[in-house]
Amino acid sequence: MTTAARLDVGAPSVGGGSHAGSKAPVNLTALDLAQALRVIIGKYASQLPILGPFGEPPAKAAWLLQRIPTIRKMGWAAEFMAELYDAVNNCRHATDRSAERVSLGECGNMVDDEYCYGTMMSIVGGRIAKCRTCGATDTARDRQQWLISEAWHVQAFLPDIARWLTSSGHAKIDIKKARNWVNAGKLEADACDVGTRRNLFTPAAVIAAYRETPTGRREQLTNAS
């Protein structure tokens, strides 16, 4: 709604002129898409067997988020997820600033028996990755997990890797346990940093060791299901 009214500070495309009495132009497309999102949120909030809050979409969205376990049991849960995802992306695409995009590696999809060398891209925080060449889609998280498991060429200190994997949500790694993996021979250093004389590890080796733990195996089973 802020973008629709061109009130976002610092947007390079904001118009309005400098003459006295001029008004900032309205992005009618963004306004329509914001209204569509508002309708979807209100529509599904009203279908829950609990009286929801009145007010603006952020309040209703926060209320819905607290009731995810209940929503999962509803027959319309998948439909809600799809409609919400599309509506949010439509709003994002209509804003003045495009969302930051990240590369998720080579596509690798087979198109007419030919290997696609295109790049899978996703917006930051998005759940879908799409190839810019052939249009194939994949789950962004699965692509990220695959990239990490193949990152044998990246070297870093163990605490840094553990922090990166934990903060990104790909693996909950306690540094003390990670050091125990090293002492037990379950995780081997890739090299030694000459300047600090500290061991260097690869994200691929660390996440491989994590997946051999009970927690890692449970997580893989949960994601597979």
Image (tube, grey):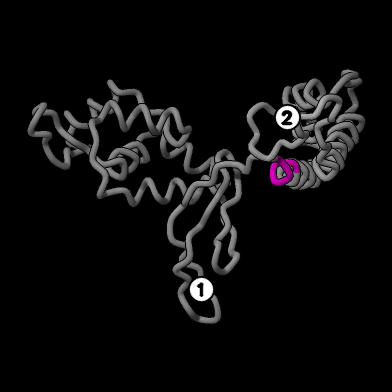
The kind of residue on which mark 2 rests is Ile
Task: Say which quarter of the image contains residue 3.
Answer: top right
Q: Quadrant of the N terminus?
A: top right
Task: Say which quarter of the image contains residue 84.
Answer: top right
Q: Is residue 207 above or below residue 130?
A: above
The answer to whether residue 120 is left or right of residue 72 is left
Q: Which mark is residue 34?
A: none
Q: Is residue 140 above or below residue 218?
A: below
Spot occupied by residue 91 in the image (x, y as percentages of width and height): 75, 41
**x 30%, y 28%: residue:** 160
Disc 1 is placed on an element classified as strand
Task: Please state the total of marks drawn on the protein image.
Answer: 2
Q: Is residue 12 visible?
A: yes
The answer to whether residue 27 is left or right of residue 129 is right
Q: Is residue 81 visible?
A: no
Q: Residue lying farthest front? A: 19
Q: Earlier in the sequence, mark 2 or mark 1?
A: 2
* Disc 2 packing (10 Å; few <14; some 14–19; many ≥20): few
| Residue hosting label 1 | 110
Q: Magenta stretch mostly in which secondary structure?
A: helix
**x 51%, y 57%: residue:** 120
Spot occupied by residue 163 in the image (x, y as percentages of width and height): 36, 27
The kind of residue on which mark 1 rests is Met
| Residue hosting label 2 | 68
Spot occupied by residue 30 in the image (x, y as percentages of width and height): 80, 41
Q: Disc 2 and disc 1: Cα gap in Å?
A: 37 Å
Taking the magenta stretch, the answer to whether it contains residue 180 is no
Magenta range is 91-95
Q: Is residue 112 above or below residue 32?
A: below
Q: Nearer the viewer, mark 2 or mark 1?
A: 1
Between 194 and 82, the residue placed more toward the observer is: 194
